[in-house]
Image: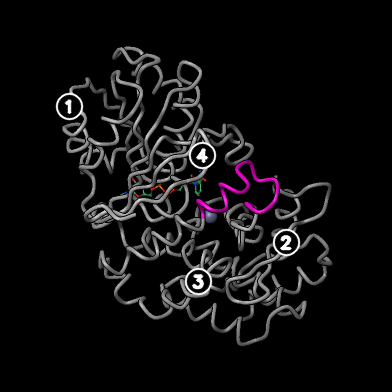
Amino acid sequence: MTTGTSDILTVELGERAYPIVIGAGVLEELRTLLDTAHNKGTVGIVTDAQVGPLYADRVKRLVVDTGRSVSVHVMPGGEKHKRLERIEEICGSFLADGLDRTSIIIALGGGVVGDIAGFAAACFMRGIPFIQIPTTIVAQVDSSVGGKTGVNHPLSKNSIGAFHQPDAVLIDMALLQTLPDRELRAGLAEVIKHGVIADADLFAYMENESARILAKDSEALKRPILDSCRIKAGVVAADEKEHGLRANLNYGHTFGHAIEAVTKYETYLHGEAIAIGMHAAALLAQELGMVDAGFVARQRACIAAYGLPTTWPDLPVEETLAAMRKDKKVRSGTMKFILAEAMGRVVQRTDVPEDIVRGALDAVRRD
Ligand SMILES: NC(=O)c1ccc[n+]([C@@H]2O[C@H](COP(=O)([O-])OP(=O)(O)OC[C@H]3O[C@@H](n4cnc5c(N)ncnc54)[C@H](O)[C@@H]3O)[C@@H](O)[C@H]2O)c1
Ligand SMILES: [Zn+2]
């Protein structure tokens, strides 16, 4: 369905179904989303110190236009602040400003703000509605859709959280104009991933349109964001709590998470580690005879076109393998890999011999 400049997708979750509104310059549609919302109380906006000064006033005015009171909570930005303390602070400032069970929380920011604000919404008064207004590529194509919310514990990332689906996701591509270039490129790794796992046409589009996409041309960005949300919404509707299919979204992540862990989350942005991880996964699939060298080269060229890494000459093979074994998604000692069979199609494998995994890691150093 298209309304004016926005497209609307639906995440089909029965009574908890919700819309994803997508377009350039569609922020004002927040008023309609609030007007149709069941909860009519005070709105709490959570944002961070980078995004707040850019966009919080506009969002605040749109809320006030609907006749509601509003409270804005600005938290420090960045992954290291994705801690349980933030939840207490957010709940404290919203309680002080009179939010109650009739309230709505708005997450205005990247994935860090979205995960924290969503978890705050899951906890506050045992759960109130929230609306995602994602402002990074990662958040627009991945984290704002699907209902995974939470914070990190010093011992393990994303280990404290809840499934809490948003009531709506409002994606305004115009907000990306201020996004730093490195964040843009890293986020696009997840779009390339969506192409590889589910949509060969999207992958071809990413191959052909890198110049316009990197120039943040709103028209060129629309398709990757729309298609990514469609793919993610479809997977989430089929497997909300990750019992099976949803794991396909982890393509490149078994390797990528380990690379992030051994570099202590300091060297690579998540998408950069996933880019290397996708290359490792392609090499692994090639070694297993699932894809040919042409597939590996094609995926690699597309990743490189976005200025993302595919190799890491210093990769410590044994340490990375150890980190992969420790990943919380490893069940009963077997590592799960999402591997391509063809462009746009992946399968899950838990039977890959460790020596072949070691070989793929070694190839990432040399390749
Ligand atoms: N819940 C999920 O399903 C899911 C999925 C993927 C990732 N995540 C989580 O998302 C987080 C990463 O999200 P991210 O990559 O968006 O990082 P982020 O939220 O840290 O944002 C990156 C940086 O960009 C700044 N920023 C955001 N939007 C901006 C804009 N429009 N203009 C200028 N600056 C802007 C932020 O202040 C921050 O400094 C991780 O914590 C990860 O675990 C969650
Ligand atoms: Zn990811």
Residue type indicated by callout 1: Val
Q: Residues within 10 Å of mark 3 (few under 14, many from 20)?
A: many
Q: Is residue 220 above or below residue 246?
A: below
Q: Residues within 10 Å of mark 1 (few under 14, many from 20)?
A: some
N-term-proximal mark, 1 vs 2: 1
Task: Find the magenta span and give its range.
Answer: 232-246
Q: Which residue is mark 1?
A: 64
In front: label 3 or label 4: 4
Q: Which residue is mark 2?
A: 348
Q: Nearer the viewer, residue 114 or 152?
A: 114
Determine the secondary structure under disc 1. helix
- Give yes or no for residue 190 being in the magenta stretch: no
N-term-proximal mark, 3 vs 1: 1
Residue 57 horizontal side relative to residue 193, left or right: left
Query: Distance of mark 4 from mark 2, alpha carbons?
Result: 23 Å
Determine the secondary structure under disc 2. strand
N-term-proximal mark, 4 vs 2: 4
Determine the secondary structure under disc 3. loop
Q: Which residue is mark 4?
A: 147
N-term-proximal mark, 1 vs 4: 1
Residue 126 horizontal side relative to residue 242, left or right: left
Determine the secondary structure under disc 4. loop
In front: label 3 or label 1: 1
Residue type indicated by callout 3: Pro
In the rendered view of the protein, which quadrant contains the N terminus?
A: bottom left
- The residue positioned 67% from the left and 85% from the top of the image is 292
Query: Distance of mark 3 from mark 1, alpha carbons?
Result: 44 Å
Q: Which residue is mark 3?
A: 309
Q: Is mark 4 within 8 Å of ligand 1?
A: yes
